[in-house]
Amino acid sequence: MNPKLRALFAVLAGILAGGLVITLVEMMSPHTPPAGMNINDTARLGEWIATLPVSAFAILLLAYFLGSAVGGYVANRVAAPTHYRPALIVGVGLFVAGVMNLVSIPHPMWFAISSSLIYFIGAWIGGRAAKPTKI
């Protein structure tokens, strides 16, 4: 397969895998919106988010880290042999999706900063874990 096409497929597979992991971890969170809440009403959603404990945001940070690590790992495994670029591109893709989420839904400032950094850290670690070891 053409290396550029393989790298593109690897990045798409990594973003898809990362998004799936993030969704699964978020689904396991005990912090869900109240029944009947319209999630398109950003004012009410913001009020609810303001009442959430720190543990709710910790679960989200864990989801973002695990998702970007899995995404980086998948990207580098599919694109192998390569350096860390596919994993880091996955980190950028998930970061862009995260920023879109932060813009559309109000979050605490500390969470916005932490979550923005964690995508790159997770993707780098996942990509590093996919690096084949020499025996």
Image (cartoon, helix red, strand yellow):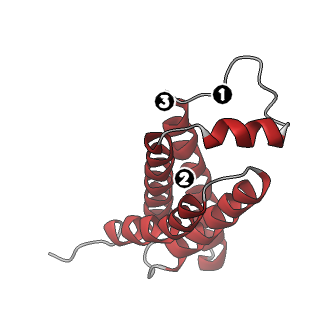
Q: Label 2 amino acid?
A: Gly
Q: Are marks 1 and 3 in contact (CB under 8 Å)?
A: no
Secondary element at tag 1: loop
Q: Is residue 9 visible?
A: no
Q: Is residue 37 left or right of residue 61?
A: right
Quadrant housing the N terminus:
bottom right
Q: Which mark is residue 28?
A: 3
Q: Residue at x 45, y 43 (%)?
A: 59
Q: Which mark is residue 18?
A: 2
Q: Residue at x 42, y 72 (%)?
A: 124
Secondary element at tag 3: loop
Residue at the spot of label 1: 33
Q: Label 1 amino acid?
A: Pro
Q: Label 3 amino acid?
A: Met
Crowd rating for badge 1 (residues with CA inside 10 Å; few <14, some 14–19, many 20+): few
Q: Is residue 107 above or below residue 80?
A: above
Separation of marks 1 and 2 at Cα, in angstroms: 23 Å
Q: Residue at x 82, y 42 (%)?
A: 42
Separation of marks 2 and 3 at Cα, in angstroms: 16 Å
